[in-house]
Amino acid sequence: MEMTSKLPRLFLYLLTALFFLNLVQSYFTELIFDEAYYWYYAQQLDWGYFDHPPMVALLIKMGAIFFDGELGVRFMSCLLSVGTFLVLWLLIENPKKDKYVPHFFVLVFSMTLLNVYGFFTLPDTPLLFFTALFLLVYKNYIKSPNLGMATVMGIVMAALMYSKYHAVLVIVFILLSNIKLIFDKYAWLSVFVALLCYTPHFLWLYQNDFVSIKYHLTERPNRAYEFEDFTLGFFVNLVAIFGLLFPWMYKSLFKTKATDKFVKALLYLSYGVILFFFISSFNRRVQTQWIIVISIPMVIIAFNYLLEHQGFRKWVFRVGLVSTIIILFLRVGLIYQPLFPVIYESHGNKAWVHAIQSQIGDIPVVFENSYRQAPMYAFYSGNPSFSLNNIYYRQNQYTIDNSESKVQHKKVLYASKYMKGGDITYLNNKGTPHFGIYIDDFESFRKLRCIVEDRPISLQEDREILVELYNPYNYDIDLQKLQFKLAYLNKYKQVKEVTALEAVSILPNVSIIKSKDTVPFTFKLPPPKMANPYYFKVGISENGLYLGLNGQNVKLE
């Protein structure tokens, strides 16, 4: 009550109005593909998932307690959004702020991504909230470091890391802004508490062979550097996250000086994230949401600057109102497609799901290479689905969970955007025809592992190479159902060639691979047709299905 009594009545009215606006938006807007994927996470709570830590799944599971459908997926995001704005307000200590409540809401509402994360449920939603909360706790900590505050800060740091791995940048840059924390016993207590709270996720990573870390650091495909799409695209993203207000946002950042430890932390966090991803842009394309975390410190910086500069305040309010009107119009367009400039992910998903379900009934659907369509179909149809990932796609949550078992030896529809015809036809949300064929007894073994010696191999070597085939399933597998194949990749880990592979078992008279057992094979590298392959990967084609992601990239000399 003490905190709310200090909040201006207008602030509470506008915050409440924003909360209900986001609730209405959540209810009427169809899911986007990433939300459907994270909804799929939430169907089986765990301490980690292939792409992200578990916070986003937990939020969706909590929301489903109160509501069904899209609102259930997004309810906690609506709460965290108003929580973020509340914490941001509390982080501003200037006594003039109560006079400029409308300016505050125009400022935060006119930021494009900060706005949409007010109702979309993505890992960045809790990341933004816990970044703001971490700054609030840190601000109080540097005023009065003590046991209780250190413990709270450790818990919030863990919550940050449970939201998204990018959170490590928030913690590191704030630490760098106050390097004396290295000698602070309470700061070390915070780190200990954070690591203790994060231990279940560390254990999950260990139990899953650090699959997330390996993918993001070593397996993820890239492409040749393009200035326009990589570095120039990074600067476009710096503009996009603030919309029409970007000149004033960066002006306030450049003009603000580090007057105390907290302002210094805001500056280090803003500049640090920008610099980190600027450097990253010379290696790979930087996605817009990767830099969204700078919105939190820069709201505080911009609003404090606004309070002290009348001309700046006037222009931010005017341009912010224009931006607010545009964003409100576009938010309606997220629901009603004719008002949106393009066909977006939130348009037409119910229609294509219904188009499939009306033709096949309740049989499961196996989507080829689509961790996006598979969960969307499951969400709107209520029926089982699975993403069968092959060598031209990437690993995802369907690679490591038990979803494959739910479609084994069942009649399924096998749907693929690569087919030129099939038993059924449906249009995706953009009107492109896709096809599906019936498979009466579907069987896949995508969890089989092909383990090749972990050292660079020369194409010039005319020798036998050992590959061990491991069966992680609880049943034996007939080797006659399996065919080894090999893919050659370029230096950016893009598959450029797939060829048959003659692998010979070292063990005589082996016709099955037993459960939890390994069978060794040898093979020679077939001559590639492509010039200068950089990696190769061994995989399995089972029952005529396209080559799977069964092996790791092996460096060629």
Image (cartoon, helix red, strand yellow):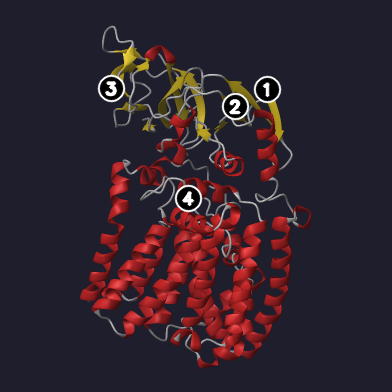
Give the CA distance from mark 4 to mark 1.
43 Å
- Which is in the foreground here, disc 4 or disc 2? 2
Identify which residue is drawn at 44% across, 87% down: 2
User: Which tag, 2 or 3, sits closer to the chain's start?
Assistant: 2
Q: Estimate how packed mark 1 is, as few (under 14), some (14 to 19) or many (20 or more) residues with alpha carbons within 10 Å.
A: few
Residue located beneath label 3 in the image: 518
The answer to whether the residue labelled 4 contacts the one labelled 2, judged by CB atoms less than 8 Å apart, is no
Residue located beneath label 2 in the image: 413
Quarter residue 242 falls in: bottom right
Amino acid at circle 1: Asp
Amino acid at circle 3: Thr
User: With respect to residue 530, does 12 lie above or below?
Assistant: below
Secondary structure state at the residue bearing disc 2 = strand
Of residue 271 and residue 244, the one placed in the foreground of this image is: 244
Residue 119 position in % (x across, y down): 58, 62
Residue 258 position in % (x across, y down): 42, 83
Residue placed furthest toward the right: 338
Identify which residue is drawn at 64% across, 77% down: 106
The answer to whether the residue labelled 4 contacts the one labelled 3, judged by CB atoms less than 8 Å apart, is no
Give the CA distance from mark 1 to mark 2.
9 Å
Amino acid at circle 2: Leu
- Which is in the foreground here, disc 2 or disc 3? 2
Secondary structure state at the residue bearing disc 1 = loop
User: Which tag, 1 or 2, sits closer to the chain's start?
Assistant: 2
The answer to whether the residue labelled 1 contacts the one labelled 2, judged by CB atoms less than 8 Å apart, is yes
The numbered mark at residue 283 is 4
Residue placed furthest toward the top: 509
Residue located beneath label 1 in the image: 423
User: With respect to residue 259, does 137 lie above or below?
Assistant: above
Give the side of residue 221 with respect to residue 431, left or right: left
